[in-house]
Amino acid sequence: MSWALSLPVQTLKDSSARHVLLCLANYAGSNGAGAFPSAKTLTDDTGLSERTIRIKLDLLEEVGLIVRGNQALAAVYIDRHDRRPVVYDLMIKRGAVAAPREDASGCSHGQNGVQPTTERGAATAPNTSINHQLTEKQQQREISEVVAEQDRQALEPQDDRQRFAMFAEFVPSANALEAQLKIAGLPEDCATEDMIARFKGFFVAKTSVVDSAAGWCFKLAGWIKRERALGATSTEDDAPSGDWASKGVRL
């Protein structure tokens, strides 16, 4: 933060942008990296609107005082990617001002003996922000785990309440499907791999149809019930069993 306070006026004349930079620095590590407060947080800190905050952040990027950092840091603490703020690194070396030197008495030559800035490269007090509560080694491990989790979530929903379009790798929950088959009055062994494959094949193409994991189990049980009913009542229909429109059945 001392770097932002001592930044020469000619480097950044916009007072609002200086205020945003000062607040952003409060969330960065000792080397200026890994600051990711949300726009709402910066709004609360500065009193500026979120629109103004975003404009000033763009300005700080344009003049080279901040750059976009490792975005995976925010993913360690925030699961939902659509709610993760941008991670910024402060370019501390740019425009840095050396602190006043002390004389033999140990006092600074600054006014009233106060030293307003630290020596360039000097150690600073640890940042208490949530950004840096973990060691670098722990953060790297957390980041690796987050990346692996994101890959896993690409193939399956985050929880039973999340709605999603059907995909080829979908595996229905055994318990949820068993419950739906019981409700429909169907035997447990009627949900064969071939039946499930035809069900998925039909809905994979219908990307506009979304449902939760439990909802898809409900649809699958209904599909199986109609499939069995059609198989029992129609033996002369040459259309594929999944072709519901040709059989006059609506899903």
Image (cartoon, rainbow, N blue to C red):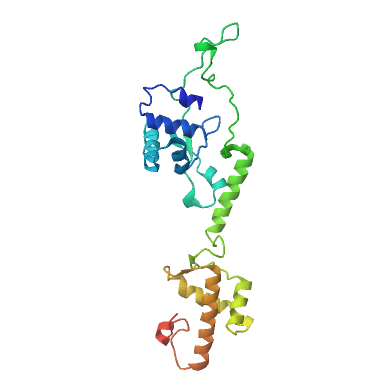
**Image check: 15 left or right of 83?**
left
Quarter of the image with the C terminus is bottom left
Which residue is at 60% across, 9% downward?
A: 106
Q: Is residue 229 visible?
A: yes
Which residue ends up furthest to the top in the rendered image?
Answer: 104
Q: Residue at x 62, y 44 (%)?
A: 141
Closer-to-camera residue (113/220): 113
Q: Residue at point 52% right, 89% down?
A: 229
Q: Position of residue 4 (x, y in %)?
A: 46, 26
Give the residue drawn at x 39%, y 32%.
Answer: 17
Looking at the picture, tell me which residue is in the foreground, 65 or 237. 65
59 shown above or below 224: above
**How many badges with numbers are in the image?**
0
Of residue 32 and residue 38, the one placed in the foreground of this image is 38
Q: Position of residue 20 (x, y in %)?
A: 43, 34
Q: Is residue 90 visible?
A: no
Residue 187: where, in percent of width, then height? Answer: 62, 84
Q: In the picture shown, does residue 39 fall above or below 226? A: above
83 is higher (above) or lower (below) than 215: above
Displayed quadrant of residue 249: bottom left
- Quadrant position of residue 150: bottom right
Please tell me in which quadrant of the rendered image residue 246 appears: bottom left
Q: Measured from the top left, where is residue 91 in percent x and y?
A: 46, 29
